Image (cartoon, coloured by chain):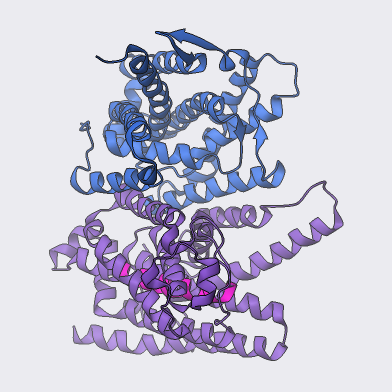
Chain colours: A purple, B blue
Amino acid sequence: MESLRRLAGQPVLGTAVTLIVPLVALAVLTALSGSLLLERIVTVMFIHLIVVTGLQMFMGNSGIVSFAHIGFMGIGAYATVVFSLDPGMKEMTLRYLYEFLKPVHLPFWMALVVGTGIGTAIAAVISFPLMRLHDAAAVITSFAVLIVIHDVIVHWSEVTNGPRTLYGVERETFLWNSALCALAGLVFAVWFRESKVGLQLRASRDDRLAAQAIGVNMVFVRWLAFVLMCGYAAFAGGLFAHFITSFQPGQFYLREVFLVLAMLVIGGPGSVSGAVVGTLLVTALREGLRTGEAKLNLMQIISGQVVGLTEFMLAIAMIAILIFRPAGLMQGRELRLPFRKAPPNAATRER
Amino acid sequence: MVNLGALVQFVVDVLSLGSLYALMALGLVIVYGILRLVNFAYGELIMVAGYALFLLSPTPLPWLVMGLLAVLVSVTTSYLTERVAFRPVRERSLTAMLITSFAVGTMLQNAATLFISPRARVVPLPEVFTQYVTIAERIVPLRNLIAIGVSVVLLGLFALLLRYSILGIALRAAADKFVMTRMLGVPANLVIGTAFAISGLLAGTAALFWFGRTGSVTPEIGLWPLLVAFVSTVIGGMRSLLGAVVGGYVLALIQMVFSYFLPPGLLEFRVTFVFTLVILILLFRPEGLIRGR
């Protein structure tokens, strides 16, 4: 145990620094460039990074695919906005809101904390019984949770304005605060992976029965990671709502599930470095393709609009990765400066 | 005193919808049974049949031929996805296969958006789909009766194939113990390929009647059939083919009872009710109604 702890202590710091330095550099360069477009892209990337890091903590360490977290991103977005929105604005944009919620008005950061708390609490309550399921049952329940959350958001006009667009949210999320949050989340995820719970979770991923035989409380460690993931997602949802300023339920559904999953799978779910690499790469790819799409539309080579090219190419990239490099680009390894080979017993290879 | 006409209408509604659901569920479970893969690209097999019909509509072919070609497109798509995407990741892990299926589904959806249109397209329908018959003083759409007839015949043929043909026996054996079946000399690729082809056949057939109801096709149309297939298989039992069929009819019954008797305020949340039921079944009775052997 002692040797394990010594082993785990060192890599955390090294990896955290290795991942943070380039991201800070990216944020600073973006701010210096003064380009509004670049700033928007990088801000959205940091928000996505929070969701992807959260997904890595659960999916990467437990080996279970999740769909539900995007639902909690939606809960976080709506819950935060209900508390942060100006009462005057609520009269216009949230007409059917419960009376007792109408005068409530919290500063952005407090609303974000409350929203994240609500999302996390809901996740904690409903997910505990689900954590003993695995394989197909785990996937279908996760999918079912997403659909239930989406359906409730779409129809619960008293809180969410229903399927209509919720507008008039103040812009509170900027490059610097989204970057700070994403980096803090990243450090925690790197630590979590090497922590006792993280190791137990990874043991249960690699061999469920053996892990339980040596005393790992599988349901509990899975649950903890799931709740953390949903907390990350809810927080990112709150940030996203105050970045985009108007949104609708459809933004927290299968399209977003796919994008976030693509980021993690392409980078490699086994490590936090994979989450970072995947988020950076997919963001770059997506923006490149979008620009391409827009150019094609401008040139009007084809009659009608070019739509769907971005997702189409992303899906193909994802399938190619799954076939040719199934553990993702990072293969479950963490980046660490200086880039020397890790000692063999410290290697945490994917199966 | 039960009103005979209302009863007939209710029974026809449940049976026709249930037949479609049964076909959809069976198509999903035939692959699940062998590979343990929950195929997220399944709904897109229905979508491609719709677009095949749309693309064939300017041709002078009779509708029956167009329908058969559309089913063939579903079968081919299903087989090709197995060949190109699922076979290379099959040996790795269930998770890899599952994510692949999700990516394949997204790819097909966006291919339709990109190469055809993100907007709805009208699907050609045969004359008989718009005709009605009168039973016990109630007007019943003829397509509902045809859907019941075709589904029952197809399900019957399928049962016979599984029970008596060598291929059917191999499929059942593979669904039971895949590794053992391979050891006994049954070629894995043949069995899995066949399962995917049958999956496409069932999806394509269901698609014809599904578009008979909706009348148009969009890139996202596969989502609802996918959900239907999920729910039906969970209700009926994920490990049993019979369970999938029973689950399909039970889901149709639940849905009809909801829409006949639920007050409008709660009807909005019927999707929530159904999927909460799914979660509860998986938690407390994961084997479903019909216990697989």
Our reading of the magenta stretch's main secondary structure is helix
x and y percentages locating residue B3 in the rendered image: 31, 15
On the rendered structure, is B156 left or right of B65?
left
User: Looking at the image, which residue is at 65% across and 39% down?
Assistant: B120
Residue at the (71%, 16%) spot, across then down: B61
* Whether residue A237 is situated above or below residue B132 in the rendered picture: below
Of A292 and A235, nearer the camera is A235
Let me know if residue A239 is in the magenta part: yes
Please indicate, yes or no, whether residue B180 appears anywhere in the rendered image: no
Q: Percent position (x, y) of residue A285?
A: 65, 66
Seen in the image, is A187 located left or right of residue A322?
left
Range drawn in magenta: A225-244
| The N terminus of chain A sits in image quarter | bottom left
Residue A169 vertical placement versus A67 (above, below): below
Residue drawn at (60%, 89%), measured in percent from left and top? A25
Q: Pick the residue in front: B248 or B253.
A: B253
Is the residue B208 above or below the residue A192 in the image?
above
Q: Quadrant of residue A157?
A: bottom left
Question: Residue B286 occupies which quadrant of the picture?
Answer: top left
The answer to whether residue B40 is seen in the rendering is: yes
Residue A174: image location, x then y, percent? 58, 83
| In magenta segment, residue A46 | no
* Quadrant hosting residue B239: top left
How many marks do you count on the picture? Answer: 0
Examine the rendered structure and indicate whether residue A304 appears above or below residue A110: above
